[in-house]
Image (cartoon, rainbow, N blue to C red):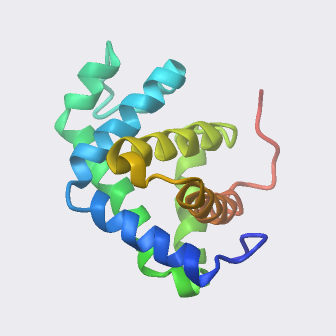
């Protein structure tokens, strides 16, 4: 998996150290990420339906057991990326398939930038002063590599506007 510029050893260390602090409470930090996501783009809420149930508000969605399960899965994907920093290409097929699943439920590739913004927000809130510009840059590079792999899973047909 190509990320444009590969992560340096120092960046991998920053990602691992910061993730150690976040991964101790994945559900709690995942809630911060998705709360921010819905704050930035409330139009994403209808994408999250379980058993054909539409959520009336982000708060209702964020407290639903099915959504909490989704949060755990998202945090596991991040954990897998962190665990495979030396060899992200081994996740290529998995991330490509994950991209296909996201496209099938109506996610637009433009939404990935909002998710990335929400991820960085969550890291900043969790890490406080340890969220340095270097940590932000390292995570941005990792997220970019993950998104590029997921986007390769999109159909070759252009998305409708």
Nearer the observer, 132 or 23? 132
Q: Position of residue 60 (x, y in %)?
A: 24, 21
Q: Is residue 147 above or below residue 8?
A: above
Nearer the observer, 57 or 86? 86
Q: Is residue 124 above or below residue 43?
A: below
Question: From where the camera sits, is residue 72 visible?
Answer: yes
Question: From where the camera sits, is residue 90 visible?
Answer: no
**Quadrant for the C terminus in the image:** top right
User: What is the residue that sits farthest to the front in this orientation?
Assistant: 129
Q: Is residue 161 left or right of residue 40?
A: right
How many numbered circles does the render carry?
Answer: 0
Q: Position of residue 93 (x, y in %)?
A: 58, 76
**Quadrant for the N terminus in the image:** bottom right
Residue drawn 64% across and 76% down? 7
Q: Is residue 27 left or right of residue 88?
A: left
Task: State which quadrant residue 111 falls in.
Answer: top right
Q: Is residue 75 above or below residue 90?
A: above
Residue drawn 69% across and 38% down? 110
Q: Position of residue 3 (x, y in %)?
A: 72, 70
Nearer the observer, 78 or 151? 78
User: What is the residue that sits farthest to the top in this orientation?
Assistant: 56
Residue drawn 29% across and 38% down? 31
Q: Is residue 77 above or below residue 161?
A: below
Residue drawn 69% across and 57% down? 151
Q: Position of residue 133 (x, y in %)?
A: 59, 53
Task: State which quadrant residue 137 falls in.
Answer: bottom right
């Amino acid at each position: 998996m190509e990320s444009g510029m590969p992560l340096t050893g120092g960046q991998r260390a920053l990602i691992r150290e910061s993730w150690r602090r976040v991964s101790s409470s994945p559900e709690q930090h995942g809630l911060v990420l998705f709360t921010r996501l819905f704050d930035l783009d409330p139009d994403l809420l209808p994408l999250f339906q379980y058993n054909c149930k539409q959520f009336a508000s982000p708060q209702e969605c964020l407290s639903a057991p099915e959504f909490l399960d989704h949060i755990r899965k998202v945090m596991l994907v991040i954990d897998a990326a962190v665990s495979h920093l030396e060899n992200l290409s081994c996740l290529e097929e998995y991330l490509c398939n994950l991209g296909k699943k996201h496209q099938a439920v109506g996610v637009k590739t433009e939404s990935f930038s909002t998710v990335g913004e929400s991820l960085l927000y969550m890291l900043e809130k969790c890490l406080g002063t340890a969220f340095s510009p270097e940590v932000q840059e390292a995570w941005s590079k990792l997220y970019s590599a993950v998104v590029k792999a997921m986007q390769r899973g999109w159909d070759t047909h252009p998305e409708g506007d």
